[in-house]
Amino acid sequence: MEREPTPDRQSFLSTLPAGRGERRLALVVVLASAALFVVAVPLAKVPLAPVLGFIPVYQSALVVNDVITAVLLFGQFGILRSRALLVLAGGYLFTALMAGVHTLTFPGLFSPTGLLGAGPQTTAWLYMFWHGGFPLVVVGYALLEDGDRPPAPAARSPRVAALAVVAVVVAAVVGLALLATRGQAALPAIMDGQHYTAAMRLVVSCVWALSLLALAMLWRRRPHSVLDVWLMVVMSAWVFDIALAAVLNAGRFDLGFYAGRIYGLLAASFVLGVLLIEHGRLYARLVVAHAGERRERQLVQLRTAELTAANHDLEAFSYSVSHDLRAPLRAVQGYVTILEDDFGARLDGEPRRLLGVIQDRARRMEQLIEDLLAFSRLGRQRLAVTSVPLDDLVRQSLDDLRPACDGREVRFEVGPLGRAEADPALLRQVLANLLGNAVKFTRGRNPAVVEVGRRAEAEGAAYYVRDNGVGFDRERADKLFGVFQRFHSAAEYEGTGVGLAIVQRVVERHGGRVWAESAPGEGATFYFTLPGGNGARGEPR
């Protein structure tokens, strides 16, 4: 089953750790709110004129703010699958619906006693249910904070989970509305006209305590995310709202009544504001990332076109080399052969030597052409990867190589190699070049020793070909695998300088790596790794 991509958790307020800047700004907002609260407390009971138009304007803004916040939180839940976010989104939906029902039942706004069969206690009790329910949701959010935990089984289908929470919230709002309207006779009287009863003080104190509990639970949870910090600001404003609108004032339409509701509107705006800012930043990142991806695609297309053109040029070059250079070379070799056959008996000394030089140079040129063609084909040739028994492949390579020993004593020591995932034909080229070099550069050693083996490493194994030949200077090792790179004179050791370049390209096309260790006069060891053969990619220690 294809796994969904993991979201970048540092891009969301609910998982992004709060920095010093967010904490400082939140503290400034809380201190400013507290200062205004202290100023408003002595004036909370000052009666003001009833402004019924204030209620629908204030409540409408509240409903819109809370609905948008709930939608944004449901969206983040769909990405992060966090149960805490799901609960909090349901809480904001609850406050939006309760604010709407509270507006409809407010006495004197749409009818003398309010709509939905409201009575004199309905609106006040709806306010208590509303302002007691949200702090309980925040407590649940703090207890369920699970940003780093795997999603719960129910959260694996975010749409179903979100719809279930919406259904629960709607059912709760309908139930509480029925209790406050049809069942208001079963509830204690908390309003006496526009003023509060003694029972109201007890009920609102409990609701106020729930807000303080939610604030404490948020503070207790560490480390705080950016969302946690702003929820603490919300609950602080919620405490000031309840205190001014229902605890410290005398009743409806006094200064505390209006001031408390302004705090409530501010509380609804804090989280919405930071969520909107966050979405703006995410959109900006998306635009930048999309532009970067588009540029990357254009570069890939350009490089692909360049590679295609280069392949066409390489095809043309290969054809030219194969046809236009081989033909004159063969003509030269043919004429030299005719001269040797027809006039060989009459040639001696310098003329015979010069014919030999021409023949030798023609053979070298032909070998160079063959090596270049082999090198050029490597980039276009598809790998026919299979499980290769390396021991058998090495034995076959040695059988092909023995005639090149020219009767010299060369001792081959081959250790157990096992199997590897590779293209047998290309891997045989690797072994032919490495073993051929080992035989060539051990000329003059008696006996010449060539070892083939596998060395265990921390992460697997590296295959090697080691000889006791002339070696090379490690300071020049960075040029060792370049095309036409030779560390010894062509007169002393024949070759085209292409073999090791072929070795490197074949090994890297298999996903492995090749490197060498040596010192002048002390032989050389060539290592290479292959996938599927416990191959390590690091150099031996």
Image (spheres, rainbow, N blue to C red):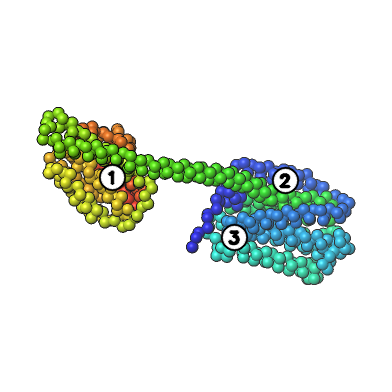
Find numbered disc 1 in the image and state the secondary structure of the residue it sits on. strand
Task: Return the disc, 1 or 3, that comes first in the chain's sequence.
Answer: 3
Q: CA distance from mark 2 to mark 1?
A: 73 Å
Crowding around mark 2 (Cα neighbors within 10 Å: few <14, some 14 to 19, many 20+) is some
Q: Furthest-front residue in view?
A: 342
Q: CA distance from mark 3 to mark 2?
A: 32 Å
Give the x, y percent position of residue 424. 29, 53
Find numbered disc 3 in the image and state the secondary structure of the residue it sits on. helix
Residue that label 2 marks: 34
Give the x, y percent position of residue 174. 74, 67
Nearer to us of marks 2 and 1 is: 1
Residue that label 3 marks: 83
Residue that label 1 marks: 527
Find numbered disc 2 in the image and state the secondary structure of the residue it sits on. helix
Q: State whether residue 145 appears in this view.
A: no
Q: Residue at x 23, y 32 (%)?
A: 489
Q: Residue at x 79, y 46 (%)?
A: 40
Crowding around mark 1 (Cα neighbors within 10 Å: few <14, some 14 to 19, many 20+) is many
Q: Is residue 359 left or right of residue 71?
A: left
Query: Which of the 4 image quadrants contains residue 151?
Result: bottom right
Looking at the rendered structure, the kind of residue marked 1 is: Tyr
Looking at the rendered structure, the kind of residue marked 2 is: Ala
Q: Residue at x 71, y 65 (%)?
A: 170
Give the x, y percent position of residue 152. 55, 63
Q: Is residue 162 left or right of residue 500?
A: right
Give the x, y percent position of residue 249. 81, 53
Crowding around mark 3 (Cα neighbors within 10 Å: few <14, some 14 to 19, many 20+) is many
Looking at the rendered structure, the kind of residue marked 3 is: Arg
Q: Residue at x 33, y 36 (%)?
A: 478
Task: Return the disc, 2 or 1, that comes first in the chain's sequence.
Answer: 2
